[in-house]
Amino acid sequence: MIFGNGIDIQEISAVEDLAARQPNFITKILTNTEKQTYDQKVGKHQGEFLAGRYAAKEAYSKALGTGLGADLNWQQLEIANDEQGRPYFQQHPRQNDLIAHISISHSGNMVKTEVILENMPNTEIPVSVNRPAWIEISKSAVAHNIKFVREFSGAKRFMAILKANAYGHGLPQMVEAAREGGADAFGVATLDEAIWLRHFGVKEPILVLGIVEAEQVKLAWKHQIIVPVANLAWLKSAQKVFPMESTNKPLLVALAVDTGMTRIGIRTENELQETFNAINRDPRFKLHSIGMHFATADTNNEAYFEQQLERWHTLTDELEISADVWRHLANSGTALWHKNPSTDAIRIGAAMYGIDSSQGALEKRDLQPVLSLKAKLVQVKQVEADVSVSYGATYTTDQPTWIGTIPLGYADGYLRKLQGGYGLLPDGRHVEIIGRIAMDQCMVALPEEIPVGTVITLIGSAGGQHVTLEDLAERLETIPYEVATTLSVRLPRYLVD
């Protein structure tokens, strides 16, 4: 759907006259990047470029309906050209909800521009709030886990890891719960997740854990997102695309050190020292933190943990790191089962969600599960013996049986391999999942006629009994995080207690 349309026509010579009469005209109209392109042009091409940008920005303001002034200024608009030479908006203030189409044409002394602003299509998957199946997130459990891990590890700062929709727990819900629980910073996997947090109102530091393409550093800088420097080549690429004008507000970066995870990060002393020095020499960059990731902290492989720690000291001990730079080495496994190698900051995901990342291999810690998955019975019927249930007729009753239908299936992340598992009635009695789990529904065998609307707990506690993420992970032959992150976004998530 079209939001607005703007057309502007300018005389190239008239714009050139304005530039000649007003010394600051060019730097007012053009961003630093556009000015660099302008300076590279010669003769009439300079005038055409300047008039084209001037007209295009006027056309944008008309399409937006604001005009250029207090609500919209020239520097908020930046126009670049793609590989085919076609103009496009590199940045504009409504790029999160409007698509900007632009055309610039020259004819003699005239330049004509047209900008069409189109509403961004709604690509969000609908959340099924009117279906009786949902996820509950316990705020009190989150607060307990943050407090326990912080005190147990002795960490000064707690970075709550919210990647992958907060491990499937729901990003909006977990932001609120973690902030109330005392989180000092947040970590995510992608730049888009980080920007979402900023738009949600998060003011705390946000670290992107995965590599951000060097071409996107201006976007990270705009939102004051901390991005990792995982190799010297990346830093050099970022330096080429990052404007000098940013020195009054540098890009925050985190040095990623690879001590044995072999995922991202710098592996050699020479490259680390050179990268460290290059960051400190460039006023456009500011080192916020330095960290590594332990690969076996939640296993019995103590030797590899110590090997990584020794490698960390070999790589970093000679670096002259200032006191205000965060050092974050510990993940959940490190914080819970090792003497913390640095009490400065910890990056905690699994433990905050109450998940035992060792899956019982190491000493149990005082963590409380955060997530519950529940659904109501939507139909209850009694069938005789020798009746098959669901696709493939893989389950057949051997006696008269009360069967309940739950509006939850593998499209919600309750996977087919969970057939034969169980849910809980409110009094704690187990009800077996019978027949194949369908896309949107599954069936349970009931002990007697149970009223429609009765809540079945598929993950969580009821009547003193428990079904945990770890239980489902064991049945699925995977890890608890995969179970949680598989839970579909169409399941509504609600904060409780």
Image (tube, grey):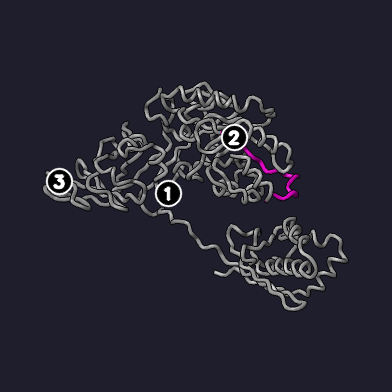
Residue 254 image point, x, y percent: 62, 37
Residue 46 image point, x, y percent: 78, 66
Is residue 186 one of those drawn in magenta?
no
Query: What residue is shown with label 2?
Result: 184
Q: Amino acid at mark 1?
A: Pro
Query: What residue is shown with label 1?
Result: 492
Q: Name the residue furthest right.
A: 21
Query: What residue is shown with label 3?
Result: 397
Which label sits in the foreground, 1 or 3? 3
Give the image quarter of residue 97: bottom right
Secondary structure, mark 1, is loop
Per the model, the C-alpha gap separating discs 1 and 3 is: 33 Å
Up-down relation of residue 477 to residue 121 (above or below): above
User: Of 410 and 70, which appears nearest the observer?
Assistant: 410
Give the image quarter of residue 4: bottom right
246 lies left or right of 386: right
Q: Amino acid at mark 3?
A: Thr
Up-down relation of residue 286 to residue 196 (above or below): above
Per the model, the C-alpha gap separating discs 1 and 2 is: 27 Å
Residue 472 image point, x, y percent: 33, 38
Up-down relation of residue 191 to residue 9 (above or below): above
